[in-house]
Amino acid sequence: MSPLSPYLSVEPRHVDQGSEWVGPVSAVNIRGRFELAFVTIGGCCLAGAGFGTVNGLRMGLQATQNLAWSKPWNVQVLNMVTRQGTSWTNTLGCVALLYSMCGVAMEKARGTEDDINTVAAATLAGALFKSRGGVQGAVRGGLFGLAVSGFYSLYNNWDHLKSRLPHLY
């Protein structure tokens, strides 16, 4: 007979000591695009906050380099840090949200997850994000999304491409 657990007041042999993850038995251990959307959006928001904070500190110190240290100087630098941090967080968070929404929609519509979804979602997200700049802005945003996602897809599949086309490198 095993001893009673001091924390649960139950016998440990009655508690299943199996996996610590809860999920369907037939589930594959690969995260879907919808589940990865939360990580993508949160990561982009944190990256935007970090970049914006550093950029705001740089801009604030540059703008106040001729001033002696005082409370107004301190407030001006902190305001610049806060403005830039929130601005970049908002921008990257919106782009990540659009990308994730388009990616989930593409996956559901096509019924498969591949690099075509990634490239199409990034292109559409870039076009939607810059659409308030008119057709020209939407085209620029779409081309930027296409370029970034194209490079990502090439990087992600580089080993596969090298094995298929050995004469290119």
Image (cartoon, rainbow, N blue to C red):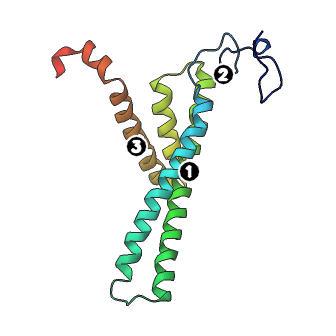
Q: Which residue is mark 2?
A: 20
Q: Residues within 10 Å of mark 3 (few under 14, many from 20)?
A: some
Spatial CA distance of label 2 from label 3 is: 44 Å
Horizontally, residue 133 falls left or right of residue 58, namely: right
Spatial CA distance of label 1 from label 3 is: 19 Å
Identity of the amino acid at label 3?
Answer: Leu
Name the quadrant containing residue 36: top right
Identity of the amino acid at label 1?
Answer: Gly
Q: Which residue is mark 1?
A: 93
Residue 98, image x, y percentages: 58, 43
Residue 87 makes an appearance in the image: yes
Is 52 rendered above or below residue 81?
A: above
Identity of the amino acid at label 2?
Answer: Glu
Disc 2 on helix, strand or loop?
loop
Q: Earlier in the sequence, mark 2 or mark 3?
A: 2
- Residues under numbered marks 2 and 1 in contact, where contact means CB atoms less than 8 Å apart: no
Going 16% across and 16% down the picture, which residue do you hit?
Answer: 167
Is 150 rendered above or below residue 83?
A: above
